[in-house]
């Protein structure tokens, strides 16, 4: 099986490393120069993350600037991914449910601030005060539902008897039951099933001719086979060398939470329709849709109305994220949207979708320090000018000028890994050195520095820093495993495997 897995990945590398199987820039006769750069970046990510097949769409100013499809939709049969290949978007379906709810709001049929009990009867007493907004933002405290053997009625009966997991509005809590209830509300107020409502009011209006609801049990022409390299170990997902087929079951009552199959092009059409008043007439409706919900203490919970929200000082984003394999982000302040669909659970395109956006909004590139905390971004900019080897010197100088100046250990560590993620290992070494300089008593800073040295092939420095990490934290399994390998006592560690994937 190991030999077979390696053979399959060799096929993937060949497929990804060739000229794109299908890529186009509609409309217009010329291909913009940045398209080649985007393709090169995506193909690098596909190799790094071992993604069999991928689609991308970029939308700006109400039109599709770029479409691309790369790799394989089906590895076993060497079926290429094209712009017509259909992918599951899993939980990104929730964004469509949010739009459906706001369509009912515009019709005067629903108030998101109202309790769910205004629209649904027979709810447990503790659920009745939960608001529609709290369902959408996953802050209701309602426990999650698990359907076993396709028995939705039994699953519902079980969850109805469970207590709230927390006081509504207290915190974020991911639970599909929220979207089961939203589906019931849509059924009742629309006078038709939510699948029909969304099909008629969103798919058809947007021109999404290759989009529908379903799961792995449905036969869908041109649908990509789903894969994974993840396995669950003690509740945590770890990457392995084995590429496996993945099968998803989305019970009909939960398809407001996950269940849409589509293409990047269809999603691009939907986003254009949404941003330009075809799905929601009033701009205020879109503002409400994309405004993060507030918790009881006034902080944001992380989700808008069905849309995960990335609140940040610049280039805020809202989007859909599904199955660790599909994502689309809308950048409302930039009139930009990016869609990336893959057939690998664990590809996590949400982690690199901002970088694609950065090819169209240059100050969103990782090289500019986009997404870093303000103090670190300022330092990043200066180090780009002077050289990253001056990191410790510049920070010491800042502390001398202002004794309150401080960089958080986690922020510096995240900065280092961010540089590493985008291939700047030498620069990352200097940032991990900075963290050791700032936090010499932290085992984690030495561990991260050691990992970075290991990546660039400096074995002696890696061993030295892993040993120091173990001195500070004798139970550090990661350092112990890596030392065992580096000093000749064993095979690859789990994190080594992840790095190669």
Image (spheres, grey):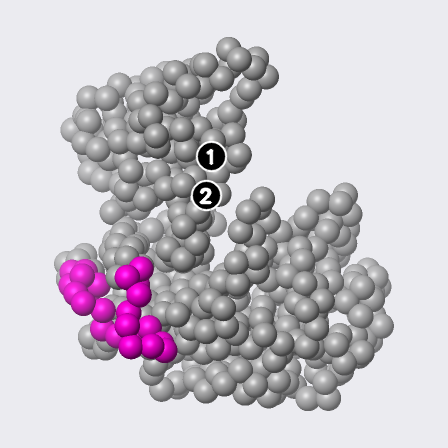
Crowd tier of the residue under label 1, counting other residues whose Cα lies within 10 Å: few below 14, some 14–19, many 20 or above? some
Q: Residue at x 49, y 68 (%)?
A: 61
Pinpoint residue 162: horizontal percent, then vertical percent. 72, 60
| Residue 193 at x, y percent in the picture | 65, 86
Label 1: which secondary element: helix
Cβ atoms under marks 2 and 1 closer than 8 Å: yes
Q: Residue 463 occupies which quadrant of the picture?
A: top left
Residue beneath label 2, please?
370
Residue drawn where x is 73% and y is 60% of the image: 134
SS for callout 2: loop
Membership of 40 in magenta stretch:
no
Task: Give the residue drawn at x 31%, y 22%.
Answer: 389
Q: Earlier in the sequence, mark 2 or mark 1?
A: 2
- Circle count: 2
Q: What is the residue that sits farthest to the top in this orientation?
A: 400
* Residue 183 as seen in the image, left or right of residue 272: right
Mark on residue 426?
none
Stretch of the chain drawn in magenta: 10-35
Q: Badge 1 is on which residue?
A: 377
- The answer to whether residue 437 is left or right of residue 72 is right
């Amino acid at each position: 099986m190991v030999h077979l897995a390696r053979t399959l990945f060799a096929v993937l590398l060949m497929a990804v490393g060739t000229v794109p199987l299908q890529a186009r820039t509609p409309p217009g006769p010329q291909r913009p120069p940045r398209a080649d750069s985007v393709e090169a970046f995506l193909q690098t990510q596909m190799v790094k993350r071992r993604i069999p097949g991928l689609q991308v769409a970029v939308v700006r100013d109400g039109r599709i600037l770029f479409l691309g499809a790369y790799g394989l939709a089906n590895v076993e049969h060497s079926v290429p991914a094209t712009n017509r290949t259909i992918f599951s978007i899993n939980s990104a379906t929730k964004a469509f449910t949010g739009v459906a709810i706001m369509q009912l709001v515009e019709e005067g049929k629903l108030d998101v601030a109202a309790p769910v009990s205004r629209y649904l009867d027979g709810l447990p007493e503790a659920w009745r005060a939960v608001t529609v907004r709290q369902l959408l933002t996953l802050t209701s405290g309602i426990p999650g539902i698990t359907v076993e053997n396709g028995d939705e009625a039994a699953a519902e009966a079980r969850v109805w008897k469970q207590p709230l997991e927390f006081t509504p509005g207290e915190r974020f809590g991911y639970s599909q039951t929220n979207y089961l209830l939203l589906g019931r509300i849509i059924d009742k107020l629309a006078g038709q099933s939510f699948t029909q409502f969304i099909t008629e009011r969103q798919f058809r209006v947007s021109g999404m001719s290759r989009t529908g609801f379903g799961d792995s049990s449905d036969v869908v022409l041109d649908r990509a086979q789903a894969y994974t390299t993840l396995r669950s170990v003690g509740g945590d997902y770890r990457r392995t060398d084995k590429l496996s087929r993945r099968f998803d079951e989305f019970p009909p009552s939960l398809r407001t939470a996950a269940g849409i199959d589509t293409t990047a092009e269809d999603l691009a059409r939907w986003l254009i329709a949404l941003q330009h008043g075809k799905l929601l007439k009033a701009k205020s409706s879109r503002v409400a849709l994309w405004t993060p919900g507030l918790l009881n203490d006034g902080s944001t919970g992380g989700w808008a109305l069905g849309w995960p929200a990335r609140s940040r000082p610049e280039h805020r984003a809202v989007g859909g994220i599904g199955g660790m394999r599909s994502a689309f982000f809308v950048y409302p302040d930039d009139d930009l949207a990016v869609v990336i669909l893959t057939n690998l659970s664990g590809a996590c395109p949400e982690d690199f979708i901002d970088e694609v956006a950065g090819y169209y909004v240059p100050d969103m590139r990782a090289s500019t320090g986009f997404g870093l905390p303000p103090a670190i971004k300022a330092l990043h900019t200066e180090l780009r000018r002077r050289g990253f080897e001056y990191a410790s010197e510049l920070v010491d100088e800042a502390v001398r000028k202002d004794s309150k100046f401080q960089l958080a250990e986690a922020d510096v560590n995240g900065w280092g890994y961010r540089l590493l993620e985008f291939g700047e290992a030498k620069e990352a070494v200097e940032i991990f050195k900075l963290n050791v300089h700032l936090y010499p008593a932290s085992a984690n800073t030495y561990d991260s520095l050691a990992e970075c040295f290991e990546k660039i092939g400096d074995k002696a420095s890696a061993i030295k820093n892993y040993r120091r990490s173990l001195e500070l934290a004798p139970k550090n399994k990661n350092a112990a495993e890596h030392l065992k390998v580096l000093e000749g006592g064993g095979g690859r560690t789990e994190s080594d495997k992840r790095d190669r994937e």
